[in-house]
Amino acid sequence: MVEVLAVIAAVSFVVASQPARLRRWRGPLGVFAVSALALTGLAAASSLWAAKPALAVVQVTHMLIWVAFALVVAGIRLPPDRMAAAFVLGLLVHSIVGFAQVIIQNHVGLFVLGELRIPPDDPLKFITAGSSLFLRAYGLSPHPNVLAGHLAVGLVLCWGLAASRRSVGRGLVFLTWATLFASLLLTFSRSGWLAALFGMTVALIWLGRLGRLSRPTAGFICKLTIIAAVLVAVFAYAFDLFLVPRILDALQGRDPRLLMMNSAAKLIAEHPLAGVGAGNFSEVTRLDAVHNVVLLIGAELGLTGLAVVGTIVVVLVVVGYRRWRVRSVHRWHGLVAGSLMALVTVSQFDHYLWTQPQGALLGAWLVAWWLTDDPGDGWDLAPGEATRSSADPVV
């Protein structure tokens, strides 16, 4: 469904846009577009040598939708407040469903909205401690880790929604942030926890460098830190039976991710130039997709694919360096930088940014947001500030 909506958005954008608007894709955004399409072309060509060509064709179709969605986001230039608010409201729905799943330890029956039917012993949704099972929160997403990655981004973007709001509005954002954080804990996703930590740290450093940490904002973040500490303490006390083994497995190297990573490294060594074909990792290895996006792309598209991806990463870093150097006054730059860091973190431990539409479209959205030219028409203004000159910084 998310890809169907993305296709509708892309077609509508092309139909409604004038040719001059479509030609504005230049500079870093143009390099991204060319690189992303080159990666898609390589994936299409990989069907010629893939063990199962149909899987490569399916992956190419997905990639075309993701690239088109990114270009639409960059072209439409929706106000950041609106995009972030819509994203966070969606996460609230997922969180409420996730709380209900945890309470009743079963699905809640929202199958028409995408909720999965969970078998009583599904190893992907439950965590174990001896003979005990506990259903993790996954909301309306295909997996708890997918929900966790989105929640990590939402926790960062919530900071932007609190800016320039009165006490009542800040209180609502505060309550929303606490709800998302509690939901993140109940996903039991270690990659999601790390993503939230690193993402918020990068956002905090960026805002501090720009001098955007006013007294109200600093106080808001301090309150969030206190509530987070309380929630973590309560969570650790209530779920230590499941939490301790899960953490020890990761620290002691018993996580099955390591087996997948070793298999990916072997495939890269055996097929270094062009890989085994897009979408064919599991077909070749008979394993789940390796939980590392870099290794997964390297195994499927070889070093050539990694070189193209590296070009996209370089473009993102260059744009960030320029904004960091000139101390960009737009608060959303720091928050999107933190969100991208969250995605970089989850990409080291999960694969859904490459294999799942929800994860890939999230990445496309943030990358396009990051590469959009600096606003000059009220794009970064808070509600009620539409008449302010674009040259005036938003405090």
Image: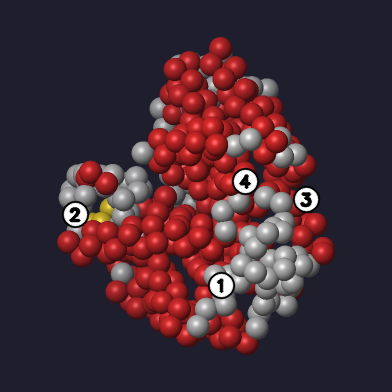
Q: Residues within 10 Å of mark 2 (few under 14, many from 20)?
A: some
CA gap, disc 4 and disc 1: 23 Å
The type of residue carrying mark 3 is Val
Give the total of numbered labels: 4
Along the viewing direction, whichever of 283 and 155 lies nearer the viewer: 155
Give the foreground label among 4 and 1.
Answer: 1
The type of residue carrying mark 1 is Gly
The type of residue carrying mark 4 is Ala
- Could you tell me if the residues under marks 2 and 3 are in contact, i.e. CB atoms within 8 Å? no
Q: Position of residue 319 (x, y in %)?
A: 75, 52
Q: Earlier in the sequence, mark 2 or mark 3?
A: 2
Residue behind mark 3: 318
Residue behind mark 4: 74
Q: Residues within 10 Å of mark 3 (few under 14, many from 20)?
A: few
- Could you tell me if the residues under marks 3 and 1 are in contact, i.e. CB atoms within 8 Å? no
Residue behind mark 1: 384
Q: Residues within 10 Å of mark 4 (few under 14, many from 20)?
A: many
Along the viewing direction, whichever of 305 and 159 lies nearer the viewer: 159
Give the foreground label among 4 and 3.
Answer: 4
Q: Residues within 10 Å of mark 1 (few under 14, many from 20)?
A: few
- Could you tell me if the residues under marks 4 and 1 are in contact, i.e. CB atoms within 8 Å? no
